[in-house]
Amino acid sequence: MNETNIYTNYANEIFMKTIRTIRPFVLFVIKIFAFFANILLLGFYRLFMKDIKDLENFLMQQQLYYGFRFSVVPIPVIHKLLEEKPQDALAILSTKEQSMFHSFINYKKKLEWLSGRTAAKKAILSLWGQNNPGIEEYKNCQLFYGKQGEPYIPASPQTHISISHSQGIAIALASFSPIGIDLEKNFLPEKSLLRFFFAPQEENQVLSLCGEEQKRQAALLWTKKEAIAKLLKLGGSLFFQEICVLENNVYVWNRSFSLISFSTEEYAITLALEKKRMTYQEIYEKTRYLIQDYLRLETEEILPKSHLMMDFNADSIAIVEIGFRIAETFHIPIPPPQDSLLIFENTVAYIQEELQKQNTN
């Protein structure tokens, strides 16, 4: 054996002894690292789920107030379903929608699109009164996109839908009146973003803050602008810098909008609803048609002094549903359960009073 082989063998023996010596320590370090990594991931997961719960509670309160329907879908759930049972994940899509899904090259785009579509179909079917829909109902509820990227339902033009997703969460709202929603994770804005998309007074306010408060306010203002753009179905063609949203009541193109915002630990969300001034006669006719349509009555049957229960035999379930429809049609609180409001002209007066409150706020 030559001298080179002797040294090589010696070096190999020393290396193997070293490995055997430090192996338990390395395994110990790996286990410690994995332990703390799991704790960290668990912490992120709990925070993520808390944010989702907070968003759902906020939307539930607004749903009771305005009568729309919503759905919140954690995108990781759809990702897991796509990996393990792709057929089940895509089963809710029509043939055309599946073709649209497969046309996307980027997986992230596919995942967000499918998550938003899942949330939208759940919200729409709930609005239509289908609380336990089957696969066929999901497939028949087809959504497509217009020129500005706005979602619409060819089979139901009167149904308005708004979708948003950000950093693991997809949200959709469905309503019989125009509505917009935007969700953003809190972010630190770049100066170029502030300069080109924020009004000067908004920029000054954001720059006056620091840390998490600055991130939260930047995200909140951004969601307000996006929610208005989605309600107007304008996509990216709305000049954000020209709209100041420091207040919750704003005017855009001679139209008045009410903005309802909320922040969780990590996310900001805003709903946009249009405020309209209506005459008493317009309210009267719209309310009469709404009740007539739901109770399947003839128009002439409904008189100012008509009592919904006594004259039309409407039960408590019908009264609740009519209340929901009034709320979502006029974007006002659901009428309280008072016997006096079961008289038609009192219902109209209540609606007019609530609309006047909105216009003066």
Image: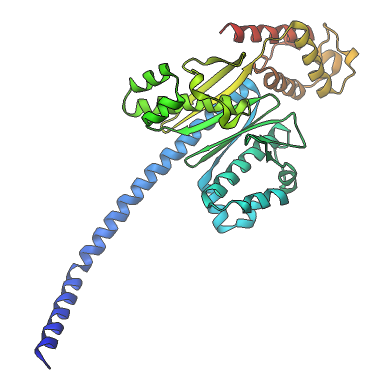
Image position, residue 302 (x, y; %): 86, 12
Q: Residue at x 9, y 89 (%)?
A: 3
Residue 111 appears anywhere in the view: yes
Q: Quadrant of residue 30?
A: bottom left
- The image shows residue 187 at horizontal and vertical percentages of 40, 33
Eyeballing the image, is 357 above or below 224?
above
User: Is residue 343 visible to us here?
Assistant: no
From the image, which quarter does the N terminus lie in?
Answer: bottom left
Is residue 343 rendered to the left or right of residue 124? Answer: right
Query: Residue 102: x, y in percent?
Result: 62, 54
Looking at the image, residue 127 lies above or below residue 140: above
**Front residue of this view, candidates 42 and 314:** 42
Residue in the picture at 73% in, 33% down: 129
Relative vertical location of residue 89 with respect to residue 361 in this rendering, above or below: below
In the displayed structure image, the side of residue 89 where residue 166 appears, left or right: left
Relative placement, left or right, of 223 versus 188 is right
Q: How many marks?
A: 0
252 w.r.t. 87: above or below: above
* Spot occupied by residue 239 in the image (x, y as percentages of width and height): 53, 24
Decide which of 201, 120 is in the foreground and name it. Answer: 201
Identify the colour scheme used.
rainbow
